[in-house]
DNA sequence: CAACAAACTCAAAGCTATTCTCAATAATAA
DNA sequence: TTATTATTGAGAATAGCTTTGAGTTTGTTG
């Protein structure tokens, strides 16, 4: 078991940019780097940024790749990774949160969501960001985040 | 009781544009115009379009104005009014649906939502609509609705 | 006005996403 | 290596919103 983890670690540090900041951030807080946390993070790195998974989907995917991680742990891990700043949490309208890799290169973006299958595409738009900023200012609100959710039906589901 | 309803009806038809189409739509389907349905619709007309209530809020307001309508009925009525096309259903992110009067004069609009108290302001933006339309087209999606939800904190809650 | 299905109320039950519990396990620091 | 203590797994519990059921009331139509 010890050997397996070492392998996992060295593998990760070769291929995953996020592993070492993760380790540091965790240890700073007396937290631990566990195989489960790595598995979740690796999953997001493998599917790449621009993909959005719910806790349930993360769970499914890990189970399918014969990496069983309990759902409770996934919820805990997702929260942790969001706090650390490695994942970004979206709140889509059709119930439930989704998560995506937060990389520095990814600017603020919006989502095109298929209401049938949940497929999500993202796009950027300065105009949209500007509109949100202006609306908040006019009403005296303190802006947190503005996201355009375009509800639509994707080609496969039409 | 019969008298009360007649009064309500004639009152409604003088002041509420929506009552007669409501009656027709209902009867067409063998459905009935009940005082409860009128009360819900009147509430939305009184607060005017541009206000968004959850089922729970509709319930509260009716109870306060000493018009007790059960919560179950409110849920059923809201669904009905949406189906008929008199109300528009929003799905905001922080859980739960909200409803607003759908009038022909109200163009597509977006929402500025206080994440603390739920206060919601609306605004319009052609740029935003255009951005949604373009995104859907590029990805081959069939557009249903695009709404910009600006999550923010309102002056009272800061 | 009477008959009858629709709709109402109240309360209980359902969802569904998330959190909690706690014994068992395992990552870390010394 | 060992002690310490964070973390895990599994399922039960929660929370909030929503729906359903049973029994009663009430629009509506002829």
Image (cartoon, coloured by chain):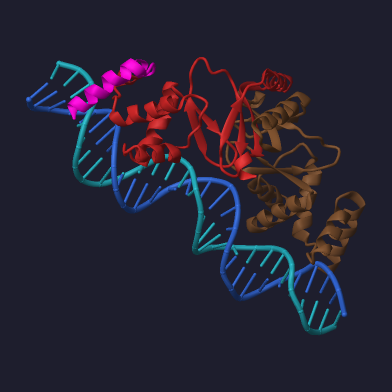
Chain colours: A brown, B red, C blue, D cyan
Q: Is residue B150 magenta?
A: no
> Is residue C19 found left or right of B3 in the rendered image?
right
Q: Could you tell me residue B140's position as x and y percent?
A: 70, 21
Q: Could you tell me residue A99's position as x and y percent?
A: 71, 44
Query: Relative to B105, is C7 above or below?
Result: below
Residue placed most toward the observer, B125 or A63: B125
Q: Where, by quadrant of the figure, is residue B110 drawn?
A: top right
Query: Relative to B103, is A92 above or below?
Result: below
Residue at the outermost right position: A14
Residue placed most toward the observer, D12 or D6: D6
Write the residue at 87% across / 61% down.
A7
Residue placed most toward the observer, B158 or A52: B158
> Is residue C7 found left or right of D2 in the rendered image?
left
Q: Is residue B11 magenta?
A: yes
Which residues are the magenta region? B1-21
Q: Where, by quadrant of the figure, is residue B94 drawn?
A: top right
Q: Is residue A35 visible?
A: yes
Q: Is residue B24 visible?
A: no
């Amino acid at each position: 078991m010890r050997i397996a983890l070492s392998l996992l670690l060295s593998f990760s540090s070769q291929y995953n940019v996020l592993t070492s900041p993760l380790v540091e951030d965790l240890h700073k807080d007396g937290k631990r780097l566990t195989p489960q946390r790595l598995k979740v993070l690796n999953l997001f790195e493998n599917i790449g940024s621009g993909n959005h998974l719910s806790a349930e989907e993360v769970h499914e995917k890990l189970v399918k790749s014969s990496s069983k991680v309990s759902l409770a742990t996934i919820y805990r891990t997702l929260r942790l990774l969001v706090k650390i700043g490695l994942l970004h949490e979206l709140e889509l309208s059709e119930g439930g949160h989704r998560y995506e890799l937060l990389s520095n290169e990814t600017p603020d973006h919006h989502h095109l969501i298929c209401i049938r299958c949940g497929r999500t595409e993202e796009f950027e738009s300065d105009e949209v960001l500007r509109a949100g900023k202006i609306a908040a200012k006019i009403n005296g609100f303190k802006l947190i985040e503005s996201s355009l959710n375009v509800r639509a039906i994707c080609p496969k589901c039409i």
